[in-house]
Amino acid sequence: MKKLIVLFWLIGLLGFSQENLLFDQANNLYNKGEYQAAISMYNKIINNGFHSSALYFNMANCYYKSNEIAPSIYYYEKALKLSPYDGEALNNYSFAKQMTIDKFDNVPEVEVLKLYEKMAGFFNVFGWSIFCILTMWVFVLLFIAYYRSETTKSKRVYFILSIFSVMNLTLGLALLNKKLNLDNERFAVVFSQEVASKSEPNLKSETVFILHEGAKIQILESYKKEWSKIKLIDGKSGWLPNEAFKEL
């Protein structure tokens, strides 16, 4: 058994070393200005099942240097999904966005809703689940203590603490639900140079607006694996053929 564990550990270590070697080779190609060759090498690493913020960031830089707008934004987005506060990635991403044709204004958000989303992001789904379970057990223990208390003063204390724990449980469940909704949101980047968003999922329907490569969209629903209803950050919505974008 120990021999098998050591063997698996050595195989994993060898695979990791090989990917590091490929990554260094790709970086050297990038430094030489051989961007397409570097992209090919980075793709080989991704196809081998390795993913990281640095890998996506370097991929995005290659595409940006090659003036390929859509894939550069796509990989900056993927890098920021893993490292949302990476200053260098955020800076380069903003430069890439300036190359896009479509400019959208954000729908103004209520400060309370922004705070609500920020609170939901404090834990992942597992973390909020644990929080809710622990809070529920605290309530149960407080209720038992309240039931067994013999003095009015202690009953009052346990009752107030029980109410407080119920409030925390309610808030935790609400934040867990919000976190689930945020995690289930689907986004994509338009790769077609120009595509018409339709009012219905067919080419003969009315054109609602035109999108160009690099535009970021939110996917609301899909239809027959050929069309998707999408929404922009300014609130506009329409239908796009799935071949026009690449989901993040």
Image: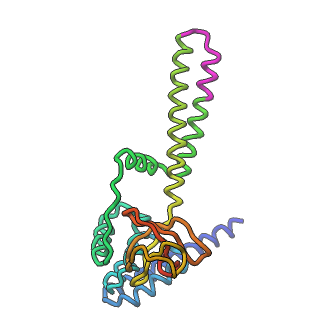
* Above or below 179: residue 148: above
> Which residue ends up furthest to the right in the rendered image?
1
Name the residue at 51% across, 21% down.
Answer: 160
Place of residue 138 in the rendered image (x, y in percent of width and height, measured from the top left) = 58, 31
Instruction: Out of 222 and 176, give the one closest to the viewer.
Output: 222
How far from the left and from the top, in percent, is residue 58?
A: 37, 77
Residue 50 in the image, given as x and y percentages of width and height: 51, 74
Quadrant of residue 60 within the rendered picture: bottom left
Q: Residue furthest top?
A: 151
Residue at figure coordinates x 45%, y 70% from the top left: 52
Camera sees residue 55: no
Q: What's the magenta region? A: 140-152
Please identify the quadrant where the N terminus is shown. bottom right
Say if the magenta span includes residue 176: no
Relative placement, left or right, of 219 versus 68 is right
Q: Quadrant of residue 24?
A: bottom left
Q: Is residue 130 above or below residue 44?
A: above
**Apparent side of residue 59 relative to residue 204 in the rendered image (left or right):** left
Q: Nearer the viewer, residue 12 or 135?
A: 135
Residue lying at 48% horizontally and 68% vertically, measured from the top left:
230
Q: Report x, y in % for residue 118.
A: 40, 49
Q: Residue at x 33, y 87 (%)?
A: 66
Identify the image quadrant of residue 86.
bottom left
